[in-house]
Amino acid sequence: MNSDDYDSSLPEGLDLRALSAFVDGELPGAERAAIEGQLKQHPQAAARVAAWRAQKAALRALCGAPPRSERDARNERREDDAADEPAFIVLRRKTPWWQRAGVAACWLAAGAGLALALGPLAPRLTGGAWGGLGGQPPSFAERADIAYAVYTPERRHPVEVAASEEEHLISWLSKRLNRPLSVPSLQEYGYSLVGGRLLPGEAGPAAQFMYENGSGARLTLYVTGTSRDETAFRLFREGNRRTFYWINDGMGYALSGPIAEGKLRTIAIDVCSALGGKPESWQ
Amino acid sequence: MNFEAEVISWLPQLRRYARALTGDRAWADDLVQDTAERAFARWAAFRPDSNLRAWLLTILRHLYIDQLRGRREIAVDDESAPWRNLEAPQGEVDGLVLRDLQRALYCLPVEQREVLLLVCVEELSYQEASSALGVPIGTVMSRLSRAREHMRALLTEGPAEGPARKTTPLKVVRNP
């Protein structure tokens, strides 16, 4: 390639940069007139300009740009192009993040308020479907369910720390929960880890790990310390969401998702045993 | 016009530029998608009095350069080279000439290709190209004239027209 701005075949004092700028209409009046004068005298220079103009037109044709090179047409061009090819970008986030965060916070508050208000009634409302001790789920299961509802619809900020930084994620959350955590793989079920976040729990911090499958369905694993001590493996239903929860060694775990109960149960049993629990005792 | 509407109005041109730059439709669409997302995420960083198109092109360029690092070199004559799958451009210029032109374009180093496309196809002024590329105007001018000469050399040195078309040695696009 030619790395020199001067070309021996061109007249002295006429450099390629100036010729190039001439082709693009970037020269001020006086310089442009000077080049025009030289082009008349120097056929090589004129041929070069012609070649570049042809190149420019051909590039525009190649790239599907409208065959108009006049700068004046620039403004119209925008509309033309827009009409030729509709914008098909997927706008995954149409509202500003703070607005979404606000909405999420409202839902969280509303959900928490509702849970508080209806909590005592719930066993009667659901006909005791929760079962278990006293007919009421430990509040971490509800919190896990609410956290699922609040964060899984997030497309942009579903997690605070992404799975790409898994090591950091685990060490950070382990530190905050004051407990070595591990994140079970759900790859076998087609779910991969999206990441995790720290949440306020009932009596201290809680961690939420989010998983997603190929079609975008999400599951969350909620982990928090708990003072309750029971070994049962239970189900909590809320709308179309299901949460299987259990307690093992001072920690409460809840796996939530909108998938079929049987399937979620299978996954939960797997998760429980991956986390050192003893699901055999429930089966 | 509000910021988002303004960004959306530039998408068709961003897409055209991305296609020309990458020679790969799918890659280009991803680049445009990522560019729009990044623009919306960073709208606060955009100064309203500056040039939105140049700003968007800068974002797209950074994403492209980042992604290039992750991709293998592509042999220009490789039948599976992404630009081979671009749609044939509409008539008016001879198809064979365009084929050669396309081949030459992807032989250029990316710095030359991008400035050529920004100025010739996207019709950015030198000032706009300078801000989109983050280099002084003088650099835009030098790169552009070198790109034009490089293209011209590739096209004239290239295979002669007609049955005596000889095959030139394979060239490889070396992405930085």
Image: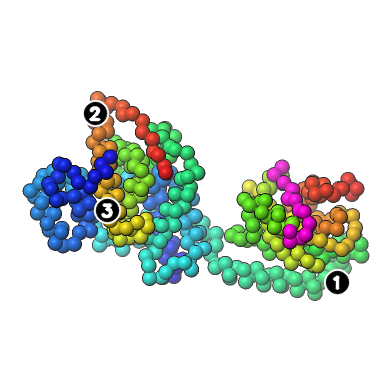
Q: Quadrant of residue A107?
A: bottom right
- Secondary structure found at label 2: loop
Q: Is residue A23 visible?
A: no
- Secondary structure found at label 1: helix
Q: Residues within 10 Å of mark 3 (few under 14, many from 20)?
A: many
In this figure, which residue is indicated by the disc labeled 2?
B162
Q: Which quadrant would the N terminus of chain A be assigned to in this image?
A: top left
Q: Describe residue A196's horizontal placement relative to residue A254 as left or right.
A: left
How many angstroms separate mark 1 from mark 2 (CA)?
88 Å
How many angstroms separate mark 2 from mark 3 (CA)?
35 Å
| Horizontal and vertical percent position of residue A137 | 85, 63
Q: Main secondary structure of the magenta part?
A: loop
| Horizontal and vertical percent position of residue B127 | 30, 61
Residue A4 among those drawn in magenta: no
Residue A180 among those drawn in magenta: yes
Residue at horizontal 10 percent and vertical 51 percent from the top: A38
Which residues are drawn in magenta? A175-188
Return the disc, 2 or 3, that comes first in the chain's sequence.
3
Residue closer to the observer: B51 or A95: B51
For disc 2, the chain is B
Residue closer to the observer: A175 or B149: A175
For disc 3, the chain is B
Q: Quadrant of residue A208?
A: bottom right
In this figure, which residue is indicated by the disc labeled 1?
A120
| Horizontal and vertical percent position of residue A40 | 8, 50
Q: Residues within 10 Å of mark 1 (few under 14, many from 20)?
A: few
Which residue type does callout 1 highlight? Pro
Q: Quadrant of residue A133?
A: bottom right
Residue at horizontal 60 percent and vertical 59 percent from the top: A155
